[in-house]
Amino acid sequence: MQLIACPWCGPREEVEFSYGGQAHVPHPAAPADLNDEEWAHYVFFRANPKGRFAERWNHSAGCRRWFNAVRDTATYRFEAVYRLDDPRPVTP
Amino acid sequence: MSPRTPGADLPEHPDLLWHDREPKRSYDVVIVGGGGHGLATAHYLAKDHGITNVAVLEKGWLGGGNMARNTTIIRSNYLWDESSAIYEHSLKLWEGLEEDLGYPILFSQRGVLNLAHTLQDVRDSVRRVEANKLNGVDAEWLDPDEVRKVCPIVNTAGDIRYPVLGATYQPRAGIAKHDYVAWGFARRADEAGIDLIQDCEVTGFTTDGDRVTGVRTTRGDIATGSVALCAAGHTSVLTDLLGIPVPVQSHPLQALVSELLEPVHPTVVMSNAVHVYVSQAHKGELVMGAGVDSYNGYGQRGAFSIIERQMAAAVELFPVFARAHLLRTWGGIVDTSPDASPIVGRTPYENVWLNCGWGTGGFKATPGIGSTLAHTIAHGEPHPLVAPFTLERFVTGALVDEHGAAAVAH
């Protein structure tokens, strides 16, 4: 089974984690100013790259804390894990 | 007597079903993706509209993606009018497809049971049955005793973790041999003069204003009058090249087969709640599918924990399977949409047509989307059956929420 390195708990089995989709999608700063198309993009549209993807994970069966990861969606290899308030790291 | 050449007594090589063509420099229509949807679209472009200056570009081999990886279930018992219309159109085409293609596809209308395990499941299922009846789709609600009559091997005992409280039943649903379906469409498209080009990956597009003028491929540039995107799980890779945001997420979806067994399973059984769906192929193997792996993935493989959970559900529902051996598991890449309905129709480019978002259920739609997408390309206007599935709906809010009937959680 794939191991995922929780930033707080270290490497644990994949089944302990749940997926949170694309990372770094902030809530709109001025929600009332958004038109329908902008709302649609905030609610429904997410990046779907083949390759490196910055995404959210939750260690739901462990410490229950959220973190971010850069993972390759073609190989499933985790390249970095980092805290929610950190910027996306540059991976080699 | 001199020794015979090895192989001299063998029969002639059988006729090829299609030819492996070299790309020409220009076509009226380029279809990206040589899976079921792409090949079916090619067939109906030729058959219904006489459009044959068409290329189907496939980055791998024909029918080697989700077309070879699905669990072949065909049904039309969806909740909303828009969905049941397109899927029922497709089912009617399935019913005449062997004759149309002149090729056996082993289409077997053995019915499908969608099990209900909770009171809410029962309410939703009965509602869907009534909606189906109003739309002219054959549907019945069965209580557990009736479920057992249709499929004696389902465990309808009251003491299992998720007891079977009943099921919806669509008798006209069934399965078909997916490879044969792809080959049948490919053969007819090839006969009509359409070029099926394998090992040809689209790497870019050439544009002029709001029109696409051609596709760049690993086998050279190809000019085209219009483009249809039928790339399923890889749709985002193409739409990213065009700069068109499309709200799909690609996930691994796994399936498996058992070793070959005597016929024990007369129908198709699906269960949303415990995430398993099972039929028995003509050859004898039990064919089972799971829910999607939660993360985005293009790897055509998933986690074994998903298979394990699916097996646990299958053995609880079908105790007779406990001694069956797993033969093989595999994964495909499904493009899931926010409302579990497909996204078909216009793009910001006036001659590029989108066909994606079928998620876990695209196989059953193969002839239906082929015929309606061909109509859409030929007329430059979305066919009425696909019109509700426009990309625009995510802005207008006119969603077609089929999370209940799409059957696989996504």
Image: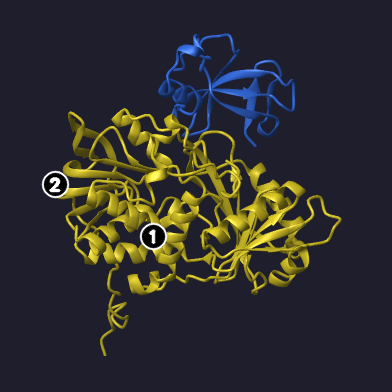
Q: Quadrant of the N terminus of chain B?
A: bottom left
Q: Position of residue B124 (x, y in %)?
A: 67, 49
Query: Within the image, what quadrant is residue B111 found in?
Result: bottom right
Query: Within the image, what quadrant is residue B8 found in?
Result: bottom left
Is any part of residue B35 visible from this angle? no
Determine the colour of chain B: yellow
The disc placed on residue B282 is: none
Q: Circle 2 is placed at which residue position?
A: B26
Q: Nearer the viewer, residue B330 or B135?
A: B135
Q: Position of residue B220 (x, y in %)?
A: 18, 41
Q: Count residues near mark 1 (Cα–Cα under 10 Å), then give few for <14, some for 14-19, many for 20+.
A: many
The amino acid pointed to by label 2 is Ser
Q: CA distance from mark 2 to mark 1?
A: 26 Å
* Residue B210 sits above or below residue B262 on the image: above
Q: Nearer the viewer, residue B390 or B268?
A: B390
* Residue B188 sits above or below residue B126 on the image: below
